[in-house]
Image (cartoon, rainbow, N blue to C red):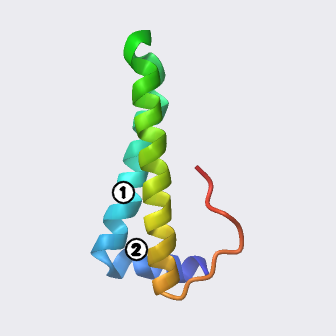
Amino acid sequence: MLRQIDNLFELDEEFRVLCEDLADVKTALNECRHLPADIRDARRLEYEELIDSLAKEIEQALSRANVILLRPPRH
């Protein structure tokens, strides 16, 4: 299965962009803890929603490519 995902990552630019976006948003979520308190919670919520949305898009792309996930994606 990992080979199939790696192949999809290499061959499908849209899938690759989704994965890269997810990695970027996860980094931003981690870094938002350094933001001032008055905006931290709003940013965290925004990033968590983006992560959920991107994870769903990735799951759909894997489904279309007939890659079967054996466990739910981690956030």
Confirm whether residue 36 shows in the render.
Answer: no
Q: Secondary structure at mark 1?
A: helix
In this view, the residue farthest toward the top is 37
Check disc 2: other Cα within 10 Å, few if <14, some if 14-19, many if 20+: some
Residue 8 image offset from top left, x and y in percent: 42, 80
The answer to whether 7 is drawn above or below residue 28 in the figure is below
**SS category of the residue bearing label 2:** helix
Residue 69 visible to the viewer: yes
Task: Give above or below for 5 relative to 73.
Answer: below
In the image, 27: left or right of 14?
Answer: right
Q: Which of 11/65 is in front?
A: 65
Query: How far from the left and from the top, in percent, is residue 13?
Result: 28, 73
Relative placement, left or right, of 75 versus 39 is right
The percent position of residue 68, horizontal first and vertical second, equals: 62, 82
Q: Earlier in the sequence, mark 2 or mark 1?
A: 2
For marks 2 and 1, give the CA distance: 10 Å
- Residue matched to label 2: 9
Query: Is 11 in front, or is 62?
Result: 62
Q: In this image, 66 relative to 9: left or right? A: right
Please name the amino acid that badge 1 sits on: Glu
Residue 34 lies, with reference to residue 28, above or below; the image says: above
Q: What mark, if any, has residue 6 been given in the picture?
A: none
Residue 49 in which image quadrant: top left
Q: Which of the numbered marks, if any, corresponds to residue 20?
A: 1
